[in-house]
Amino acid sequence: MAVPQFARVPVWAIAGAAMAVLLAFAGRYGYHGDELYFLAAGRHLDWGYADQPPLLPLLARAMDTLFPGSVVGLRLPAVLLTGLGIVVAGLTAREFGGGPRAQAMAAGAYACSPFLLAGAGHILATHMVDVFLWTVVVWLLVRWVRLRDDRLLLVAGVVTAIDLQVKFLIPVFWIAVAASVFLVGPRALLRRPLLWVGAAVAVAVSVPTLIWQARHGWPQVEMNRIVADEVSYAGGRLTFLPMALEQAGIGVGAVLVVLGTWWLLRDPELRAYRFLGITVLVVTAVFWLTEGRPYYVGGLFALCFAVAATRLDRMFTHLRPVQWKPVVAGAYAVSAAVAISWLPVQPISAYAGEPYSPMNMELEEFGWPQVADDVAGAYHSLPPDTRAATAIVTETYWQAAAVEHFRPDLPRPYSGSRGFHYFGSPPESAGATLFVGSDRERLSRYFEELRLLRRIDNGRAVNNGNQGEPIWLAEERTASWERLWPEFRHMTFTW
């Protein structure tokens, strides 16, 4: 079946505009705590980590090598993959027979999604790469249904193999696809040898990180439970679907996700793709039941955008432009404004004195140099003989990563938090510990003498996760670090 030509000009124009917006705000505040952690993990390269496979730390190290100390440079992959995701959304609409207008609508929906634009495109993060690779895999699968070119399945397997070096979520998609295809077809998909060759490639490439997980007691499984607890804090299953639709886009994205899923399931012309509609439902149900994060379904947004845009475009041909153009233009304008509002558009001074909110994650892009400098100030305030035998330990992996990045002149920091715990324990020769965070009651279980040296102050009265955190001098350790370090390990954000 022939398809329309690719609408290069409008789709690439939308992608370019979105990337320009992302670049404009890329260096507004500073590194996010997760980005500092990826940089730290990149300095401790391994086959796996407690909370992720190895690709993001490797990518972070590469970008920091190319653009040393540049926040914008580090985020260039996020900007580029967002632009490419917009293009793939347009290509997916083309596969469903969508002409230039439908392709532009699908691409525009991707660009106007708060999650796909600001959530995935603003910082270097695992979900940024994961959602793009899901989008590519879905496009390849849609294209295979039309062409039956099995080489597409092999490429999909290779893309899956890459994604498994970022997150372990995409097997849920493939299991849902297999079950859906078995139920409604095309069952021939499951008999394609190149599909299974691609699957074998994905499994083989994942062996090293799976071995790392096995040797370390499968911390990723524990991390999944932590994510479920965090989602419960934000409303759990009750808010999962509303938040997922919000992340798809207020005004356009949410509507297209619902309509796209409906048409995949019910439109007779899309019978060959019905398995993908069922896949959307199954994947959503799995992540809802397991209390995954709502954005875990973001890799399926472009599919729904493409289907809905194509069908709506056909409907518009039967209406006069005055009947639909103002409504569509207004909806996209509102969606774009909402998506941009998720970026750090306000000056940091606008948050001065505001109550702390763990949901305001953009504030975790601010104040990290001050954290490192306050730790340095506390460290250098110690007498020389004490300072020479003092280890630096932090409550969170973000704090340790900030100290390591911004103050390489200090002794190497340690933390029992998440992946940082596996980077090593403090030396036994350290007679004192400069501990960042926690409280006197908890630390008194491990140290007989505690003295509060100072509290972290970002100098702008911005109440983020670090503002006011204590810095302790802890002495007279109650046991060796070898014995105590396992007790400092924690996968929750705070100890």
Image (cartoon, helix red, strand yellow):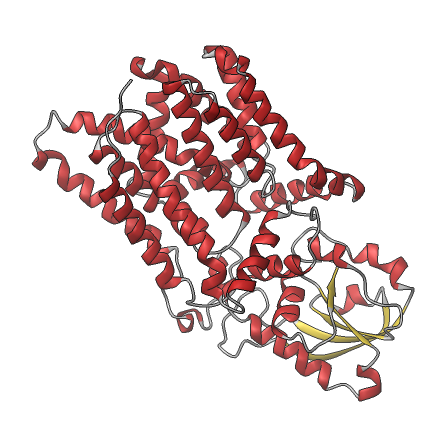
- List x then y, in percent, for residue 378: 70, 81
- List x then y, in percent, for residue 235: 52, 43
At 56% from the left edge and 58% from the top edge, which residue is drawn?
Answer: 62
- List x then y, in percent, for residue 189: 49, 15
Outermost right residue: 479
Q: Is residue 55 left or right of residue 385?
A: left
Judging depth in this view, the residue of 379 and 422 nearest the camera is: 422
Quarter where residue 205 is shown: top right
Q: Is residue 487 left or right of residue 361?
A: right
Viewer can see residue 472: yes
Q: Is residue 83 left or right of residue 8?
A: right
Quarter where residue 342 is shown: bottom left
Viewer can see residue 249: no
User: On screen, 60 above or below 322?
Assistant: below
Q: Quadrant of the N terminus?
A: top left
Judging depth in this view, the residue of 423 and 398 nearest the camera is: 423
- List x then y, in percent, for residue 451: 78, 79
